[in-house]
Amino acid sequence: MEKLRRVLSGQDDEEQGLTSQVLDSSTLSFSTRVKWFAICFASGIVCSILGTAMLWLPGAGTKLFAVFYTLGNIAALASTCFLMGPVKQLKKMFEPTRLIVTIVMLLCFICTLCAVFWWGKKGLALLFCILQFLAMTWYSLSYIPYARDAVIKCFTSCLG
């Protein structure tokens, strides 16, 4: 009866211990996180560079560029999941300060692949790759305090 009372009141130490053990066994050490971040980010850069090199191939060059460039950006974005964890990464991605740029970035990923495979519009795929670059840059700047404000101020002073 005492155990039932502890469970219903949320004071069951045995269950909390089991949950803690499961979470502790499924987490990565800091060095493992950094290694996998570096591997995933480097593979993203290699895919993007490889895609850029394939842009100049005759025939299917534009298609290969769009695919490798998009995969590179997705790998670079996914690499941060190793540093902070996938749930925290998703929460940060959809915070109000990053919500619009996250949606634009994800739509650009999808539209790039649609433009290449289903619509067959190479020029549109290149446009979406440029928008991917701009969205990824703006998204990355959102993690640096006051960086987006500095960029806006720089552009307004140059244009105004």
Image (spheres, rainbow, N blue to C red):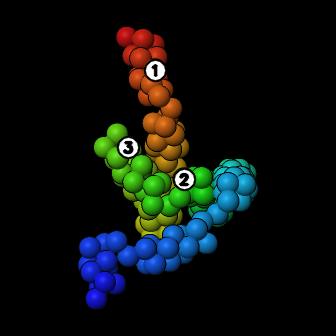
Specify whether 88 is left or right of 96.
right
Quick one: label 3 or label 1, which is nearer the N terminus? Answer: 3
Q: Amino acid at mark 3?
A: Arg
Q: Nearer the viewer, mark 2 or mark 3?
A: 2
Query: Which residue in the structure is indicated by mark 2?
Result: 84
Q: Is residue 44 visible?
A: no
The answer to the question of whether label 2 and label 1 lie on touching residues, with beta carbons closer than 8 A, is: no
Q: Residue furthest bottom?
A: 1
Residue 84: horizontal and vertical position, in percent?
A: 54, 53
Specify whether 154 is left or right of 5.
right
Task: Determine the residue positioned at 51% across, 32% down.
Answer: 144
Q: Amino acid at mark 2?
A: Met
Name the disc covering residue 98, or none.
3
Q: Which SS class for mark 1?
A: helix
| Residue nearest the observer in this picture, 83 or 79 | 83
Q: Residues within 10 Å of mark 1 (few under 14, many from 20)?
A: few
Q: Is residue 145 visible?
A: yes
Figure quadrant of the C terminus: top left
Name the disc covering residue 150, or none.
1
Task: Determine the residue positioned at 53% across, 58% down.
Answer: 85
Quick one: label 2 or label 3, which is nearer the N terminus? Answer: 2
